[in-house]
Amino acid sequence: MKNNKRKNEIIEDFNSSASVFSKWKPSKSFSNIFEKSVLNSLKSLNKSGKIDVLEVGCGHGTWSESINQLDFSKKINYTGIDFSRKRIEAAKKKYIKDKNTKFIVSDYLSYKVNKKYDLIFFIEVFQYIHVNDFSKFFKKTTELLKDQGHIVIIDKEKYSIHSLKIYLGKLFRKLPFYYGHVHYPSFDHLEAFGRSFGLRSVKRIKVKEFNAIIFEAKN
């Protein structure tokens, strides 16, 4: 019950802030770590057939634009899901120009699809997931991943100056309302979870305040 209440509060925050984030553009360092993790993973997965990609918590769809700028983007089937209906509506209005791109309103854990993906990525998603639910997300992700497929998680680190600033900002009520449920994950913890689900940790990357980890599904 408590987790459902928290999820509904996060959805409400996301819907309320949809107009704010529809104008958002990533910083240079954010774009840099996206390129070094997600885009480089896509390049390593580039093959003769189609590449199926799922972005979990796609928000208003900004990162789909970067994927569509790749020179082999016509081979990529991109799906973005988010449980905020207003953010998905904003994504559809702004970015759905290609027939290989689609956005869906869905809770990831109840998302049903008759296919598997070459790449599944999460950008600033685990900061909203309660640590008790990490295993559910890894289980779901491994079920949806093809053999030798990649998982990329980008977020900020729990044990960092940035995390401390967020904690103090919430304590003294100096942050916007949509930071209320943010709790950054430990990347050591994420790596341990991935390994416990049979994933191979390929690389960890850090660019300023952003961290990324890349996993690969074993055969």
Image (cartoon, rainbow, N blue to C red):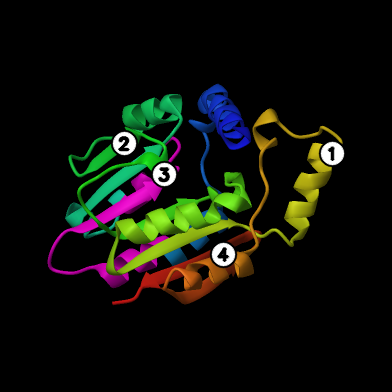
The residue at which mark 1 appears reads as 171
| Quarter of the rendering occupied by the N terminus | top right
Front-most of residues 48 and 72: 48
Which label sits in the foreground, 2 or 3?
A: 3
Identified by mark 3, the residue type is Leu
The residue at which mark 2 appears reads as 103
Question: Helix, strand, or loop for circle 4?
Answer: helix
Question: Can residue 55 be seen?
Answer: yes
Identified by mark 4, the residue type is Leu
Q: Residues within 10 Å of mark 4 (few under 14, many from 20)?
A: some
Question: Helix, strand, or loop for circle 3?
Answer: helix
Label 4 and label 2: CA atoms lie apart by 27 Å
Residue located at (51% from left, 41% from top): 25
Identified by mark 2, the residue type is Phe
The residue at which mark 3 appears reads as 109
| In the image, residue 5 above or below residue 51 | above
Q: Residue furthest right?
A: 172
Which label sits in the foreground, 4 or 2?
A: 4
The residue at which mark 4 appears reads as 190
Marks 4 and 2, the one that precedes in the sequence:
2
Which label sits in the foreground, 4 or 1?
A: 4
Q: Is residue 96 left or right of residue 140?
A: left
Marks 2 and 3, the one that precedes in the sequence:
2
Residue 141 image position (x, y, % from top left)? 39, 56
Marks 3 and 1, the one that precedes in the sequence:
3
Label 4 and label 1: CA atoms lie apart by 26 Å
Q: Is residue 179 left or right of residue 74?
A: right
| Quarter of the rendering occupied by the C terminus | bottom left
Residue 186 image position (x, y, % from top left)? 65, 62
